[in-house]
Image (cartoon, helix red, strand yellow):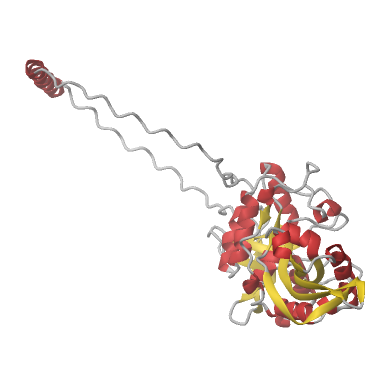
Amino acid sequence: MKHDDEFAYFKINKLLWRWKKQDGARAVHEVSLSTDSAPPPLPPAPVAAAKSAPSPLKLPKPDPTVKMIDDLLKVAHSVSRFREWLDTPAPPKLTKPAKSPAPKKTVPPFDIQEIPNALRKEMMPIGAKLMERWFAGRLNYSPSPSDEFNEINQHGKPYPPDMYDTTTVKMDWVLKFPRARHKYDYLVNDAIRSPAALRVLHKKLHFYKHRSELSTRDISRDDPQRLHRFFQFQHVEVDGTFAEKIKLQLMADVARTGVPDDLTAALGSFVIYAAVGHVRLSRDPLDTQRTTAEVTGVWTYVKDNFTFTDEPTERSQYLGHWSGNGVIVMPLDGVGAASPYIPYVESPVTLGDPVIKGQVYYPIHNSDFRRWAAKHQRGGDFIIYSDRRFVPLFPPIVLYL
């Protein structure tokens, strides 16, 4: 194998959580990412409870005389076999076979399904868990961006119930990340009271103007999809997909550029939503045709699509170079100002002896996951809903319906 060219590369410094530049990555030209490993088994279908086995029949005790005859026959058979063994000549001595030449050392394969374990080594366990769910799922994807927005799959039907994850991502975990907390605080303190949000609220609540109280948890039957569909009225976006952070790293001063973290791996660019939680409604005593609505609380939650889609007219997004040991980034010097893409080393590279497992890093793109899905007819794009956090409002949002 050839590995003549050497490059600088960047790896994650987990102490400072920044990119650290290092030298000595060598291109490897005769290896490629493996997609051959079989996908995980699908969850087994429920099986009916097995009937209890009937108790075995009780056989009568053998006759003593018959047992004595059987024992004598066994002894005679053993003596006969022993005499036959004594009369058998010794087998000829076998000559030692010639030593075969030592096998040629090869690069251990790296399969795409090893990336979740590599994510764990980079301290991204939630991202790893969600990616493993994608690999284990049955084939499910949206043919177009509009289908993805409407949650329509390749069969032209709504995503099936098993393509919704409502247990993995928790709001407490999301809000541990400063960039998510900053956007969340803006949502609950300012954005939900904006003129645009009030217009949407007015439209959503007008249908309930003749009630005295509204609890959306009861109306939606605690179903996050129903709550989102009928009562969501404001949102904020949290930016930063894995590919976008890699691209920023390739373009910017890498010493000061933040690296992808577990929030990036799990959700990428995602949205935090606010939905109506609780409302008090009352008739105006001076104008019985007008109802006052006081929104005293809202639900907040994350909704996101876990998928590996690219924009139709763009090159597939580069997600870094991966091995069983983690991720590195391979920027390529000499960027042309007119180039629409940020170039990177497109071949696998090794950081040491390539025959040692984990020393060869492979470039990974969204398209690699799509090829795997096409090959195995597996890989389920799914929708993530976090748990919901109730936020009391002081003062309440007041509307006149």
Above or below — where is 85 with respect to 20? above
User: In this image, 13 relative to 334: left or right?
Assistant: left
Give the image location of residue 391, x and y in percent: 70, 76
Residue 381, position in %: x, y?
A: 71, 52
Can you give x and y, in whole percent of width and height, for residue 183 in the image? 76, 78
Tally of numbered tags: 0
Closer to the camera in the image, 127 or 399: 399
In the rendered image, the quadrant that contains the N terminus is: bottom right
Counting from the top left corner in percent of width and height, residue 140 is at 72, 47
Task: Identify the image quadrant of the C terminus.
Answer: bottom right
* Residue 249: quarter of image: bottom right
Nearest the eye: 155 or 218: 218
* Residue 4 appears in view: no
Residue 346: image quadrant is bottom right
* Residue in the foreground of this view, choosing between 56 and 392: 392
Q: Residue at the spot x=67%, y=65% of the render?
A: 386
Examine the rendered structure and indicate whether residue 47 appears above or below residue 91.
Answer: below
- Horizontal side, residue 53 vs residue 32: left or right: left
Q: Is residue 48 left or right of residue 215?
A: left
Q: Quadrant of residue 324?
A: bottom right
* Residue appearing at x 30%, y 35% in the figure: 95
Tell me, yes or no, if residue 53 can be seen here. Answer: yes
